[in-house]
Structure formats: structure tokens, C-alpha cells
Image: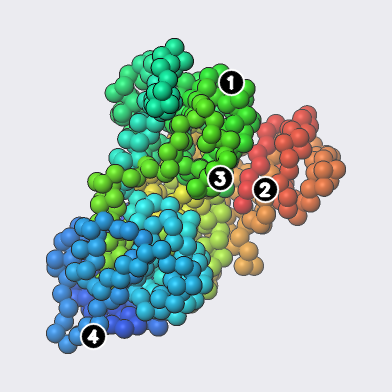
Amino acid sequence: MATSSISRVAKNPTNFSIRNVESQKKSIFSRHLSFSNSSISLQKLSLVKGSYFSRKFHTTTVFNVLETVESKSDLLSRTQYPDNVVRTERPTILVSEKLGEAGLDLLRTFGNVDCSYNLSPEELCAKISLCDALIVRSGTKVTRQVFEAAKGRLKVVGRAGVGIDNVDLQAATEFGCLVVNAPTANTIAAAEHGIALLASMARNVAQADASMKAGKWQRNKYVGVSLVGKTLAVMGFGKVGSEVARRAKGLGMHVIAHDPYAPADRARAIGVELVSFDQAISTADFISLHMPLTPSTNRVFNDETFSKMKKDVRIINVARGGVIDEDALVRALDNGTVAQAALDVFTEEPPPKDSKLVQHENVTVTPHLGASTKEAQEGVAVEIAEAVVGALRGELSATAVNAPMVPPEVLSELAPYVTLAEKLGRLAVQLVAGGSGIQSVKVVYESARDPANLDTRLLRAMITKGIIEPISDSHINLVNADFTAKQKGLRISEERVLVDSSSENPIDSIQVQVSNVESKFASALTENGYISIDGRVKYGIPHLTRVGSFEVDVSLDGNLILCRQVDQPGMIGRVGNILGERNVNVSFMSVGRTAKRTKAIMAIGVDEEPDKDTLKKIGEVPAVEEFVFLEL
């Protein structure tokens, strides 16, 4: 839509977001935080500029969550409680698994701490209605039944560690309970354990130790391999992966890495080359896994993956057991593709006693010891205690992993745009190819509303969610979206364009641009070389309206196949027949073109995911120049 003569472009989006904040601080900061058994009024809430966190009748509302402007310690030291507010009861914090004393001491300064370990599910449900906070490790399952039994009193669940597979996030959000974790304290411990497994595997330390204790002296049997000059592929270049890379460089190894979000400049700074997934696994002598367990990484190391590796490759896993198909790994070990494996994590923990993988003579195993150092345990305890106390004080935590509840009227208006924003993010990340990773994203909002009245924080968070979550274990919400993007080196800028249309709808269209990347679908690139996709809401339903320079009109529901083709008769029928023959149901189809009988893009919605043969047949149609399958 063309802009009118009064159109304006938001050159500095941040200024629009914080407009008039200074004049509003006094009224915002004086509002009350209300809990079920206590009422706290914060005179100064400066952790987040212009923020207000309200909990009343067990609901949570978050306004204007922007950037951290002071450290947490500064906030805690400056926060005061007015004379007219009396806290009638200290909060009760249930710790259901062992936690370091430093963390427990911090908790005791703020509330009553109940350390009750090894609770059965029934015992946990019986106690939880008397608790304001719950701290767990990986052994306690915090299910929907736990949140129901809490009867609205439970305000925060703290996971002492990174993974949150044992917490029902959906139920937590529904019951207005914040979930926080401790993602940084065990980084060095996990990296050190990865290097320990790497070295001990290469020199057969565990096997030689067992042999000697059995009374044997087998020097010739346990000849190892050197690490110097060997290529190590780090799969997942986050906190732990990058620390492993640093240490491996010190051992004289050549280090490459694969991570779709790792900034190339950060990798280069420590002498690491970012490469594609296939290049990493096909050229490495050692492969160290540091990727999260997500639907896209579940059993990503399987028979097909192992077949692409160098013979006698060696694998280390201190990440998540589920990223390896354990039966396929046994086969690869037996046929010599994989010479050795060193594993700290397993699909099922503890693994079965008769596990072929655990018992294999070329496998070194440890019982999930990655974070098991005294220093890491104390660090995790302090980190999670700080996060839980902060949440009970009403602060917004950067380690929050579930979305806070927002006013129903806001959700009602933004609901279809929230879905649109997330799906545009998901489409954008799937269109990116190559090993350089996404570093720069620009979001353009067209609206008839004044930019000062257009709050896009939730939409930006959902675009961030769509981009990051499909290939990460991060859980993105309004609280942690900007923090997580920054941690992953992802810069998201916004531009608001005033257009001449009805102001009844908050947003006219959303455009997502991804710069400095290669694309799996070249037609998604603009003349300026960046990926660009547009969407809008029609009749309450999110639609994709443009891909690159091609206009389309497809409902963002189910899955999507994009084909660039020569614009000629019969193309819709040929592709449709291929899908029909394979029992793939077509839900919609749209064709966009730049000019008659030149090039066109066909967008096809499908209910099922076509198999590789079906997609191959579509690609073999002579007039089809390129295609891509996208999951929504």
C-alpha cells in the first residue's frame, strides 16, 4: 500500500517505544504488586526502564518491558517498602532436590525454606498449596497436576539448571506462574567434562583402567590417537560449545563449528570456522555435541548422518541424549564408521542395565556429570536463588522461560497479529541457508495508527520466538525476547510506517527482512540482496502476501511449498497431480508473478509433509526452477 502525503517512517524505533517514559515514571513506579498473601508497593522499580509488573487475583500483566538499565544488585539495594505496607507473612519456598548451601542461605534471607527431598508426585501435590515458590532440579516433575494442586498460590518455579523438560510450561503460564532457570553457572563445568571425555576416549583411559584392575597389562591393545592437528567439529556454538572450542584450540586441534545462530565474527575471534552441518560431520575427526534437544534435532545423528562421516570418527556428547539415535550409533560402532564414543547423556536416564551402547567396549560413559563440580553446583544454587527471590519481589527475570499473562483486551486485539508475527519468523529462518547464521533482522510495521500509540513489543517477541525456537532450546516470551536475541548475537531493528488506511486494525502489514545471509529459495531475495517476506491479517486469519518481489496470497496454516517456475499453462495441474498421487492433501494454492509468461511463484499449502521422493519429483518438473518446503 502506498503511503500518503503525511506518511512518516520511524527512523529510531526505540524512541517510539520509550516516548514519554520519563513523565510517566512516577505514576508507574508507585503502583502496587499484589500477591495472594502479601502486598508489596515498590517505590523504585529500575531494573527495567518504564516497567510495571502487576499480579492480582493470580494473573500477571507486564507493561513496557524494555532494556536493563541497572544491575540487579543495585535494584535490590535501592528497593524500599513504604511505611504503610506491612508484609504479614514471609513467602514459603519449597526446595525438592539438593541445592548448594550458598543458594539456600540466600533464600533464607527472604523467606521460609522447606527442604523436602525425594517427594512422590502425591506428596508434592499435597505440599504445594502451602508454597509460594518451588525449586527443582531434573528429578522432580512439575506437572499440570502440581499447578492445579497449588490453587493459585505458587508464583514461581525455579529450575536449578538449563533444561526445563520436567516443567509443564503451558500449565505454568495458564496458572500465572513464572518459570525461571539457571542457564550460565554450569557452562565451564560442562565444557571441562567434554574435554575430559575427549582426551580419555582418545587415549582409552577408562578401558585401560578397567583392564589393569582386572589384573591385566595390555599396552598394545590400548594404543590411542593424538589430538594435535586433528579436526574437531563443535555442533552447537553456544556457551558450552564455544568454551570447548577454546580448550580444544589449546590442545592443538583444528576447530570448526556448526550453529545457525553463532555470529561469524565471534567464532573468528577464537579461531573457529563456521561451516554447514554436512561439511562439519563429513570432515571432522572428532565431533562434540552441544546442541539443544528440539523437534529438529531429535535423533539428528542417525544412520543417514553416520553414513556421511569419515571412517573412524569419534563422538562426544555432553548435551542431550535424544539428539543421537542410540541404536544407529551402536550399528555405526559395530561397522567401524564410528571408532569410539564418549557419552555423558542418554535418551533414557538412567539407561537400561543391559544397554548395548553402555556395554560397548568402544564407548566411554559417565552418569550425566557435566555440571557435577562443587563450583558449578554452588554457582547454579546462587543463580537460581537470585532468580526466584527476584521473581517473588516482582522483578522481571532475564531467565524467565514462559510468557507472562497480559490483559485479555490486549490479547484480543493482537491475537491474529501475534500468530502472524511468529509464523513470519518461522518462515524467515527456514529460508536461510549456509553456515554464517542470522545476525540482522529488520521488521517493518505498516499501520494507520500513530507510531507513539503502536506498541509492537509483543509482536517483536513473537518474531524472535519464530526465528529462534525452531532450532534452539530457548523459550521466548515478552520478558526474555530481547535478552535472548542479544545473547545469540541477533540484532532486531524495527521501523514503523504510517499509511493511509483504516485505524480500526492495529497493524496493516508486517514485513520481515533478514540481511547478510544466503537463501535456500533465491526468489525470496530482494534486489538489495536480503530475504524479505510480508504478511497481513485477513478476516482474522494470518496470510503470507509477498515473497521477495513476488506477490502471493496464502493462509499461514499447515505447511507450505514454494516453487519458482516458468509461467506457463499446466503447472498447477502437474504439481497438484504429483502431490495427489502421493496422498498429500492440498489445502490452497496461489500463484504470483512479476509479468505474464515470465517467472512465477506457486505457493501450495499442504496438510501433510511430503516425503523426499515426492519433493524430488516436484523438483524434476522441467519448468520448476527451484522449490522449498516450509513447516509452519
Identified at 82% across, 43% down, the residue is: 582
Q: Position of residue 591 (x, y in %)?
A: 72, 46
Q: Which residue position is annotated with label 4?
A: 88
Pointer 3 or 4: first along the chain: 4
Q: Residues within 10 Å of mark 4 (few under 14, many from 20)?
A: few
Residue type indicated by callout 3? Pro
Q: Quadrant of the N terminus?
A: bottom right
Front residue of this view, candidates 132 and 27: 132
Q: Nearer the viewer, residue 330 or 152?
A: 330
Residue 438 is drawn in which quadrant? Answer: top left
Dot placed on the residue nearer the N-terminal end, 1 or 2:
1
What residue is at 30 percent from the left and 40 percent from the top?
A: 188
**Relative image position of residue 84 (x, y in whole percent):** 17, 87
Secondary structure at badge 3 equals loop
Please give left or right for residue 327 compared with residue 579 in the image.
left
Q: What's the amino acid at mark 2?
A: Leu
Position of 558 relative to 271 (above/below): below
Q: Disc 1 designates what residue? A: 336
Q: Residue at x 54, y 43 (%)?
A: 353
| Residue identifier under label 2 | 560
Front tag of 4 and 2: 4
Q: Is residue 185 above or below residue 108?
A: above
